[in-house]
Image: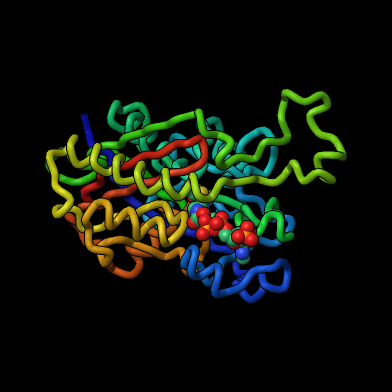
């Protein structure tokens, strides 16, 4: 079976910059608190009227150009987001329509911060089996539209940012030792309440009501301490699963790209794995937590900066709502 390679990458970050000082004007927080707890200095917000599908579409155009393919060659789309334009359908079909592609399948993945690696794993299986030849994988989030900017929601509101990224996945040459070596997916649904958006829920009748707005039931909520404690254990576990599968040691990893949840989490994951922090790609300072999009944004940026060279060993890992967590080992 052919290994899958990432043949093109792209990102789109909306232009509107929001600094910690801007958030200080909205809620009782401070630049110092945010930086100390998360490492974030600024993030970008998309304007009203723009959806995560628009961010994903713009990133997709860049990935298509980078892969030097014609968009008509794409034979499948996978889209990961927790902030879709609509309750249904998902953003996969919206991106398909914006690209003017006809009849190809479009799959939506809903695994929150782990969404990119889950989607990558699905793409990898389709490429390995020869089902598809050029898959567009998009991860995009517009978090800013549904955060509680009052003191009640400040724990979450300061962390998140908007952005999109895309990759093209296709079969590599069988004589080259590169590509996606393995992916590893995990979940534990006993902890959904630690990080969730409880409403709207089909359990309610009616599903939407005015008191959801007055009672602030429509905002996501988080048990930050539980998320922190679990993330710093589960991401290293996922990485160790990938190392074991590939008979590799952590010393052989050139770049660790963790989901940019919080810089303190990334640093603790590095410490737990005993990987030098210089090998960890970290850009949350400038983007905040862009959820499913954070890993492909970091990958695209690291490639642009020339940090990743052909033959380098890359390890991706993520943890998020669900709980879900994952890893992927990629020889570039
Ligand atoms: N600004 C100022 N003060 C705040 C803010 C804020 N934005 N948010 C919370 N506080 C206050 C709290 O209300 C609390 O006040 P109190 O002591 O008067 O009750 C105080 O700060 C301390 O709150 P804690 O929750 O104890 O703070 P902690 O040190 O645990 O930090 C944080 C909170 C940053 C959320 C931390 O738990 C954390 O890093 N958790 C990980 C969560 C995370 O990174 N999630 C990312 C999204 S999930 C994902 O991507 C995997």
Of 60 and 120, nearer the camera is 120
Q: Tell me the quarter of the picture where residue 17 sits.
A: bottom right
Q: Is residue 141 visible?
A: yes
Instruction: Say which quadrant the N terminus sits in.
Output: top left
Taking the image as shown, residue 120 lies to the left or right of residue 196, namely left
In the rendering, at what x and y percent does residue 59 appear? Answer: 50, 55
- Residue at screen point 57% across, 74% down: 31
- Residue at screen point 18% across, 50% down: 250
- Residue at screen point 27% across, 57% down: 271
Q: Tell me the quarter of the picture where residue 55 sits.
A: bottom right
Indicate which quadrant contains ligand 1: bottom right
Colour theme: rainbow
Of 90 and 234, nearer the camera is 234
Taking the image as shown, residue 93 lies to the left or right of residue 151, namely left
Taking the image as shown, residue 196 lies to the left or right of residue 187, namely right
Location of residue 288 with respect to 169 vertically, above or below:
below
In the rendering, at what x and y percent does residue 104 appear? Answer: 51, 32
Of 252 and 102, nearer the camera is 252
């Amino acid at each position: 079976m052919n290994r899958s390679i990432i043949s093109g990458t792209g990102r789109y970050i909306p232009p509107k910059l929001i600094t910690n000082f801007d958030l200080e004007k909205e809620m009782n927080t401070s630049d110092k608190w945010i930086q100390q707890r998360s490492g974030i200095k600024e993030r970008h917000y998309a304007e009203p009227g723009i959806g995560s599908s628009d961010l994903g579409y713009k990133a997709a155009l860049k990935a298509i150009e980078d892969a030097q393919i014609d968009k008509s060659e794409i034979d499948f789309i996978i889209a990961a987001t927790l902030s879709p334009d609509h309750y249904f359908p998902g953003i996969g079909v919206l991106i398909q329509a914006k690209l003017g592609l006809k009849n190809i399948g479009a799959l939506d993945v809903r695994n929150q911060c782990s969404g990119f690696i889950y989607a990558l794993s699905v793409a990898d299986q389709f490429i390995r089996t020869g089902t598809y030849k050029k898959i567009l994988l998009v991860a995009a989030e517009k978090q800013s539209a549904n955060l509680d900017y009052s003191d009640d929601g400040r724990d979450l509101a300061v962390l998140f940012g908007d952005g999109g990224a895309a990759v093209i996945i296709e079969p590599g040459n069988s004589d080259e030792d590169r590509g996606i070596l393995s992916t590893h997916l995990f979940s534990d649904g006993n902890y959904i309440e630690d990080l969730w958006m409880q409403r709207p829920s089909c359990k309610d009748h009616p599903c939407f009501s005015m008191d959801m707005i007055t009672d602030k039931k429509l905002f996501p909520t988080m048990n930050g301490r539980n998320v922190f404690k679990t993330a710093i254990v589960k991401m290293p576990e996922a990485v160790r699963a990938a190392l074991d599968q590939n008979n590799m040691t952590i010393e052989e990893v050139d770049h660790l790209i963790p989901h940019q949840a919080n810089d303190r989490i990334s640093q603790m994951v590095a410490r737990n794995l005993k990987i030098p922090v210089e090998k960890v790609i970290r850009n949350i300072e400038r983007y905040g937590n862009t959820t499913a999009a954070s890993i492909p944004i970091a990958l695209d940026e690291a490639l642009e900066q020339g940090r990743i060279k052909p033959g380098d060993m890359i390890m991706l890992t993520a943890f998020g709502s669900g709980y879900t967590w994952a890893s992927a080992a990629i020889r570039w």
